[in-house]
Amino acid sequence: MNAPETVTTGNDPITDAMMKVLDAQRQDYIKEGHVSAETRIDRLNRGVAAIAKHMDKLTDALNTDFSCRPREMSMLTDIAGSITPMKNAAKHVRKYMKPVKRKSLFPLGLLGGRSRVEYQPLGVVGIISPWNFPVNLTFGPLADVLVAGNRAIIKPSEFTPSVSEVMCELIADAYDEKEVAIFPGGPEVGAAFTSLPFDHMIFTGATSIARHVMAAAAKNLVPVTLELGGKSPVLISRSANLKKAIGRIMLGKTMNAGQICLAPDFLMVPEEKLDEVIDEIKASVAEMYPKLLDNPQYTSMVNDRHYQRLNGYLEDARSKGGEVIEVNPAGEDFSAQQGTQKIPPTIIKNPSEDMLVLEEEIFGPLLAIKTYKDFSETIDYVNSKPRPLAVYYFGEDKKEERDVLDRTTSGGVCINDVIMHIMQEDLPFGGVGPAGMGSYHGYDGFKTFSHAKAIYKQSKVDIAGLAGMRPPYGPKTEKSIKMQTKV
């Protein structure tokens, strides 16, 4: 653990240790004053170098924590997915830091008054990262925290302890603890962490946990960015190329075995195309994964808790008369596996609304498929549910596409693909409603972790005298009032 010796502040030892680091970071931040572009770039570059240095250890740790996670996917999502935002931030830091000119109230601008916004660091930001992409969802937010000139303290997930151990080594290699620190541990560490008086906190994880995080933060009036989840629907139009659409959908659904907040949660397809869609799903999975059980490229569930949760959803669907279709190209016996908790991609055909697969976020390789007669039914159905993190539309009908964009509300949208919008560093990533609040990535992340300071510089002209703003009030005052209230 990258933490100092315990001090006594009247709290428990865990909180004491965290508070000592937080105070040290805040004091060092205040002492530093203006955080130059050079300093920010240096901190970002040190992070990039440390990730590159430890990437083999990180991919091995990811494989250990998941019991089976392909190195290639870990490199693409967690390693490259951490280096890219840090390099992007370093590239654009000077542009982000530039003051933004704003208009001054007429006629102050004409008389020499000048308005601008300068973005100032907030101070110390707490980052709570999840287990599904524990590296990317630590260093992605950290990139935006550092480019904004802040310090950071990180609480990684206890479900990926091997990764946390490597990240502790990585952080210690790259940063002084007054810049970036990390505290791994279980729920007791998490509870202590959320009680700290950060200047901002970002949490990525489950909506149920987010309620506790937000409540704890509220006691110190700490602003929060919450990146949550929800049930992201896929709306497949009659105009869609089914083979291409299903190929992209199943790539997103089987990546990390569906353990992605943005994974497609359920499909809505034209009723006459249901069987064709199922056939395409089977073909797509067979092409990517001719076998699953002993295939090192197919990810396992992270732990037994999530394995049992997903099997519980399937038992629930079967008990309620649901048709459950296991997509198992090699016909393997998944009950005989040892050392992993793999679940094959599994379809729940036309589920009823009381099934858990339609009530709960899946976060696994299960995929419910609903049908519709008229495309408008898909929009009505999405709007009848809590707002999702993403909506995915497949098709070439421009009116349908526009209706999806205008009539549904979600954190983001992909058209003719899934998940890919999170890879665009120049697009904000975030949720809405129960899917989250606030956003980050690129310039939007810089602004999230900055204070937009309003600055007005008055002209040398006696504005108050000219406008009759200074007592005793008289004709100039009345003229000014009349001008400003004219309708």
Image (tube, rainbow, N blue to C red):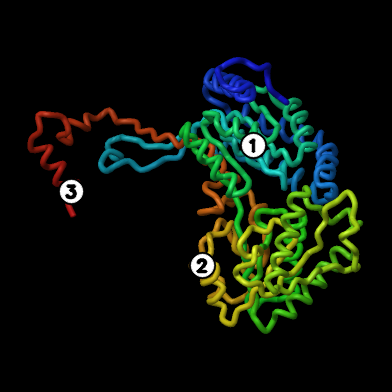
Question: Residue tagged by mark 2?
Answer: 384
Residue shown at 14% from the left, 34% from the top: 468
Q: Is residue 179 above or below residue 244?
A: above
Identify the residue at horizontal 64%, vertical 80% (top origin). Answer: 270
Circle 1 packing at 10 Å, graded few (<14), some (14-19), many (20+), is many
Type of amino acid at the residue the image marks with label 3: Thr
Callout 3 environment at 10 Å: few (<14), some (14 to 19), or many (20+)? few
Instruction: Work out whether 33 lies above or below 207.
Output: above
Q: Earlier in the sequence, mark 2 or mark 3?
A: 2
Which x, y percent locates residue 31? 54, 18
Quarter of the figure that contains the C terminus:
bottom left
Quadrant of the rendered image containing residue 192: top right
Q: Amino acid at mark 2?
A: Ser
In the picture, measured across the screen, residue 34 lies left or right of residue 455, that is: right
What kind of element bears circle 1? helix
> First in sequence: mark 3 or mark 1?
1
Q: Mark 3 — residue?
A: 485
Residue named by callout 1: 142
Q: Mark 1: which amino acid?
A: Leu
Frontmost of labels 2 and 1 is: 2
| For discs 2 and 3, the disc positioned in front in the rendered view | 2
Q: CA distance from mark 3 to mark 1?
A: 48 Å
> x%, y% of residue 396?
62, 75
Residue at (81, 69) in percent of width and height: 327
- Quick one: which residue is furthest to the bottom in this view? 272
Is residue 285 in view? Answer: yes
Q: Quadrant of residue 347?
A: bottom right
The front one of 184 and 138 is 184
Please tell me the numbered disc located at residue 230: none
User: In the rendered view, does 65 fall on the left or right side of 93?
Assistant: right
Callout 2 environment at 10 Å: few (<14), some (14 to 19), or many (20+)? few
